[in-house]
Amino acid sequence: MTTPLPKRDERSALKFDPKNEALLPNFFEEFERTAKAAGIDGDAERMKRAVLGYLDAKTMRFWQSLDTFDDDAKSWEDFKTEILDYYPGATGTAEVTTEELVRVVETFKKKVISTTQELAEYHREFAVVAKALRTQGTLSEILIAQHYVVPFPENIRARIDTGLYVHYPTKKVGQAYTINEIRKVVTFLLSDASAPVSSGSFRSGDRTLDNQGETHCILDGGCSIVVMSDSACNAFGFAFDPEKRINLQSANGNTDWSLGLAKDVPFRFGDVIAFLQVQVVDSPAYDFILGQPFEILMQASYKNFLSGDQHLTLTDPNTYKVVTIPTVPREPPRFRKEDSRDYRV
């Protein structure tokens, strides 16, 4: 039993919008399925004429003008192939230009990206054009990354490189950061410090550094090192070994180095003390980040509550004492360049 083709004015009728070329293959697929149900899929002439009923007048006249339309020797596939040749956007062969990427960047630069929702919207639009340019070989990953960071506020751009250093310390020299990696860091930087945090990785706690004072620490198990800012290092007066540096790479592909390694920095959590090896980094977005080495050494475990609260349990590796402490939402760094000494002892 066959199903008649829907009439043009019926709600179930197919429609093709010539302004949206990318959907043309979907239109053909739906039409062929409908034609098969109507029992005309084996008749090329009927297929050619039937498809015209779902087009606007201008598009219909153009399709009728094609050589394969009136040529009975040409199949439906021949007709469809000729049509697709005139719609490069439908086959993915349309050339994308750098100007299109710049337009996306400039549009969002005017809007000012200040929330993670705005970042997500920008990333979706940017990623589509960037992928096409990368596939065409028009832009390298490094150049794409340079365009990607342009719309972000200055206070965010100034902290991206450090965030990348911390989150991807094993990135090889010369290997570009992807826009997805940059997006992860920017998402972190844009997160509202007073808003609920969904992941324990980005919770933090105020810890005493060997009775020298309390500081704000970010807990991030996704980071493979422990880091402190040079401003925090100056404020607490920690010495570090400038020979124990690691290579860091920025979003634009430039490489830099950490300032050095501060050895056996004591972090006190109640009756529990952790002695950590900490890399000192220039002008980061935080005072301290306690990465994976901290979690492993202290056998860290998290417990989350429906209220949104979170508890962190730590075990002293030397005394085996156990302590459970609450975490607090992330806050801006307490130590800044202007607040710390401009010299080192």
Image (spheres, rainbow, N blue to C red):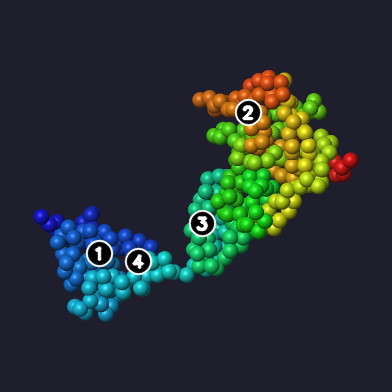
Q: What is the three-letter code of the residue carrying label 1?
A: Tyr
- The mark closer to the camera, 1 or 2, is 2
Amino acid type assigned to the residue bearing label 2 in the image: Gln
Choose mark 4 or mark 3, whichever is in front. 3
In three-dimensional space, the C-alpha distance between marks 2 and 4, rounded to whole angstroms, equals 60 Å
Alpha-carbon distance for marks 4 and 1?
12 Å
Q: Is residue 332 visible?
A: no
Q: Which residue is mark 4?
A: 18
Q: Considering only order in the chain, which callout, 2 or 1, is on the residue closer to the N terminus?
A: 1
Q: CA distance from mark 1 to mark 3?
A: 33 Å
Mark found first going from the N terminus, 4 or 1: 4
Type of amino acid under label 4: Pro
Q: For the residues carrying marks 2 and 4, which lies nearer the camera in this image?
A: 2
- Residue 54's mark? 1
* Type of amino acid under label 3: Ala
Q: How many marks?
A: 4
Q: Mark 2 highlights which residue?
A: 299
